[in-house]
Amino acid sequence: MSKTSRSAFAAVIVALAPTFAQADDLGLRGTIEPELRLFTQSASSTRQKDTDISVSGELTGKYMWDNGDQSLIVTPFARLDQRDSRRTHWDLREARYGLVMGKWEVRLGFDKVFWGVTEAVHLVDVINQTDLIEDPVKQETRLGQPMLRVRTTQDFGTFDAFLLPYFRERDFPGANGRPAYDIPVDMELTRYESSRKERHVDGAFRYSHHLGDIDFGISYFQGTNRDPILTPALSAQGDLVLAPFYAQMKQASFDVQATKGAWLYKLEGYWRRELGREYEAATGGVEYTFYGALGTEGDVGIVAEYALDSRGLMARDPYENDGFLALRWTANDEASTSFLGGAVVDAETGAMGFRFKGERRLGDDYRLSAEAYFFGNIPRRDPIYSIADDNYLQFRIARFF
Amino acid sequence: MGMTGRTYRAALCAAAIFTLSIISSGPLRAEAPGLPAPSDPAARGLAIAEESGKRDRGWGDAKADMKMVLTNASGETSERALRFMMIENTDGDGNWSLMTFDKPADIEGTALLTYPHVKEADEQWLYLPTVKRVKRISSANKSGPFVGSEFAFEDFSAQQVGKFTYKWLRDEPCGDRTCHVVERTPQYENSGYTRQIVWIDTTDYLFRKTDFYDRKDSLIKTLTYQDYKLYDNKFWRPGELAMANHETKKSTRLVWQSYAFHTGLTKDDFSTASLERAR
């Protein structure tokens, strides 16, 4: 976040504070979540350690008026990290005004948008930048994106138009960070294809609808690709680093889901034009849930998906020819206990990744979670080779207030 | 591997929690006129169910808050809080609903939109606020517990008259009123019940009690409807629903607060797009 937007944000908070304090229709809530990470292998760099303690916090202020048709939501997020100064970061997840007028809706400010249907890889979801240091493996956490969004919902579907006036750079771990690439990314060396750099104005359009069992969407995006090309370079200090380059792209995409009883069938994909080249990628699969599995009150869900990228191993996205399999057990108990085990296998390189997650609520206001990430059989040519020595366990306890 | 498991399942719920309470009002009389004779128990049972539904027509749209109190066998309690929006659907397919969780805090803002159907599967969408994602979900889960409570999904969703066949059993006193006692048998797939026995009073045609029989045909749960209040001089709603599980000795109370009718909601407020709005 730039200095100007930081001080603008502070000004907004100060200006709104008295309004919040008096308003009846005010909601204020937050989370504090300490975290411990344990790495089970020796690091590739002496600057990387085997343990890491960190704490994150998020606060949401919500103010609604005009019978709920107008709303203001501000959600700052921050993390303090013991080792990595880059992971010590903050972001405005949301800071937006919303107006509903019958079938029309307008939103202005920092916001988040999700497109797509699949579980493992989110190919068509391109509006928000990934918060990579927050979520280095799954990459599902997003940075807030400044936008003007106009939506209309008609009998024949929902139309969204987006104007995206400012680009958010992807954040990367620092030299002490872990998991991380063996060669650190130097964000001082960021370059853009557009001469307007991060001020290039992007635009997007989406149409989505549901007909019976089928939910579908088609989208178009034109502007700065959120996914940078990383090329080796020398830093100002003369060290070997990776320099991010953000190209302009045009993307047309679709996503579709069929819901048939306990079966879900999902498919999404895109066509892109970037730097004079065209390429495609798609992912899809099935999800099935056994309700009341094995005579218990719990459910067992199975997800099987596959992802394909026409660029093959040249793809920046690590999932170019990969299969995913996940098993999820939910106890349906008072504490919402659940376990998840997932595996990804690269059909081309044989590289494998595993994720395990267990969580439950403790009382009304706490939630415990434990996660494990393991990588195996990763050849040097695979894009995720760099984090192959970063197997880790992660424990978190969230306090909600 | 992107899975949103906990909230995904935890917040799954079914249509119209309030269809449970949507019963009726009417003038004081011993029995609705024109009810088929006891010699035809199937027709009489169906007519009683239809009368109960008919007396509640015309409420239009409604908002209400619900507190859910879960009590385990050793008496420890935990609470959930939800907000409801409902719109009446007069085509017999069931009322549309949008419910939002306020508590527990870790699933706050999670919302569920339901378009119930009698013949086809219900249509349901779940909104996950942390990832801003609207997901179409399977509505095949009927018998599973709703957020760890003693209510199953079908106890909320399967309330339309057309989802059962009926058999009138007898009329008998219930509290200070007389009740029709009717057996109803689920006609939809994946039900956890062989049958239910419902007590519907002959004065206002309000549900007073339901006994649930599991797949082994043993009595597993009993639901009682309490503190009925009259809204807009026309619509009766229970202030409290108490579900007792005879097997696990656990129970769940639903406490309804701040009912409001004809609040100006339209079908636009029940679109998949409206799920993403601040509430």
Image (cartoon, coloured by chain):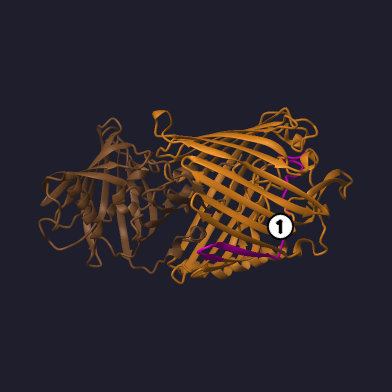
Chain colours: A orange, B brown
Residue range of the region highlighted in magenta in the rendering = A152-181
| Camera sees residue A31 | yes
Q: Amino acid at mark 1?
A: Arg
Residue A84 figure quarter: top right
Q: Residue at x 52, y 58 (%)?
A: B276
Q: Residue at x 15, y 51 (%)?
A: B36
Residue that carries the numbered disc 1 in the rendered image: A168
Residue B78 figure quarter: top left
Comparing B47 with A49, the one in front is B47
Q: Residues within 10 Å of mark 1 (few under 14, many from 20)?
A: some
Left or right of A350: which side holds B247?
Answer: left
Residue A110 figure quarter: bottom right
Instruction: Give the percent coordinates (x, y) of residue B194.
Output: 28, 36
Comparing A39 with B170, the one in front is B170
Instruction: Give the percent coordinates (x, y) of residue B252.
Output: 31, 43
Comparing B120 with B279, the one in front is B120
